[in-house]
Image: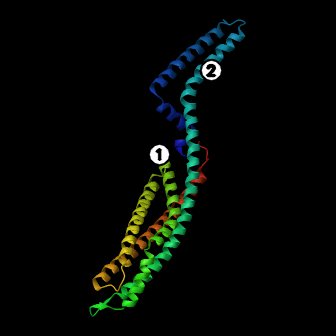
């Protein structure tokens, strides 16, 4: 079904309604002159005033046609040309939107798979550490296992691990910022407002979780880097840091799933929009 806002009739009405008042007054004046010229020309024809002035009558006829066409060109045709430019820009933006969405879908899938594996690794090491640092008769349940799992958690929070983690997340950030920029242009063109707001919320949450995760890794690495068998109090602090680290990774995985669901939700809408492009108005 054609959008009523894009039909020729509605565009003409909109063009006239939104034209500057001075331009509308100019159009009324020119059309009045043209009507007077038509009436006078009709009287001249009836009384045979022209005689053999065929060239003069042709010139007058063209001038009268020009008087009628000039306001239409200034008001209506200019508006139609502007609408065509906007439509071409909209099609270009939708193509960019589709490409950016495809890239983001691929990146979030890759990042999600990596974070899923990371969650499993961190869960196993955290559970092993929590089990080993249980306090039994005032001491650790398994000091050797506590030290071993502490080294593993320290490696998972190491700066080199964060750099590797950054390399995995970087493509997601690049593609997400590209889609964010496209959403900004779409919003300026009056489209995709709800989807843009939803994506902005998701993206801000992801950036916040990434910042918090980096801080958690830095604090955890410092805590686990201290050598020796941990005391009961230190073991409690280390356990809390390990659990916070696990929760941070799990939260990031949850947001990746939300982002993937968002991409899967808007892709059918994009496909329907592509099918509607180019349908003529009535």
- Residue located at (47% from left, 48% from top): 187
Residue 161 x/y as whole percent:
47, 72
Residue 79 visible to the viewer:
yes
Residue 268 x/y as whole percent:
55, 60
Indicate which label's residue lies in the foreground, 1 or 2.
Answer: 1
- Residue located at (59% from left, 53% from top): 274
Judged from the image, the secondary structure of the residue bearing numbered disc 1 is helix
Q: Give the answer, above or below, for where 237 lies relative to 187.
A: below
Q: Which residue is mark 1?
A: 188
Residue found at the very far bottom of the displayed protein: 137
The foreground one among 25 and 178 is 178
Residue 188 x/y as whole percent:
47, 45
Q: Which residue is mark 2?
A: 65
Q: Determine whether label 1 and label 2 are within 8 Å by CB.
A: no
**In the visual, does 252 lie left or right of 82?**
left
- Residue located at (53% from left, 19% from top): 30
Judged from the image, the secondary structure of the residue bearing numbered disc 2 is helix
Q: Residues within 10 Å of mark 2 (few under 14, many from 20)?
A: few
Q: Quadrant of the C terminus?
A: top right
Residue found at the very far front of the displayed protein: 227
Residue 7 visible to the viewer:
no
Q: Give the answer, above or below, for where 66 lies relative to 274.
A: above
Q: Residues within 10 Å of mark 1 (few under 14, many from 20)?
A: few
**In the visual, does 278 lie left or right of 255?**
right
Residue 189 x/y as whole percent:
49, 45
The foreground one among 192 and 123 is 123
Q: CA distance from mark 1 to mark 2?
A: 40 Å
Going from N to C along the chain, the mark reached first, 1 or 2, is 2
């Amino acid at each position: 079904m054609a959008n009523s806002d894009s039909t020729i009739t509605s565009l003409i009405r909109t063009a006239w309604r939104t034209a500057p008042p001075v331009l509308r007054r100019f159009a009324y004046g020119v059309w009045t002159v043209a009507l007077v010229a038509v009436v006078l020309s009709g009287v001249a024809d009836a009384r045979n005033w022209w005689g053999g002035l065929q060239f003069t009558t042709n010139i007058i006829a063209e001038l009268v046609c020009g008087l009628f066409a000039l306001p239409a060109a200034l008001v209506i045709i200019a508006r139609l040309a502007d609408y065509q430019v906007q439509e071409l820009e909209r099609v270009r933006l939708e193509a960019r939107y589709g490409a950016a969405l495809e890239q983001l879908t691929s990146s979030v899938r890759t990042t999600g798979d990596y974070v899923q594996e990371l969650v499993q690794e961190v869960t196993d090491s955290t559970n092993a550490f929590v089990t080993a640092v249980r306090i039994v008769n005032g001491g650790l349940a398994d000091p050797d296992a506590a030290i071993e799992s502490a080294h593993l958690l320290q490696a998972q929070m190491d700066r080199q691990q964060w750099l590797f983690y950054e390399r995995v997340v970087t493509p997601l950030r690049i593609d997400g910022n590209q889609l964010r920029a496209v959403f900004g242009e779409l919003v300026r063109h009056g489209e995709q407002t709800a989807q843009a707001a939803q994506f902005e919320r998701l993206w801000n949450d992801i950036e916040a979780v990434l910042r918090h995760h980096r801080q958690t890794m830095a604090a955890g690495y410092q805590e686990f880097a201290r050598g020796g068998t941990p005391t009961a109090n230190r073991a409690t602090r280390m356990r809390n840091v390990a659990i916070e680290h696990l929760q941070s990774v799990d939260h990031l995985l949850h947001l990746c799933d939300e982002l993937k669901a968002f991409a899967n939700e808007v892709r059918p809408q994009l496909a329907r929009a592509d099918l509607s492009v180019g349908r003529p108005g009535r």
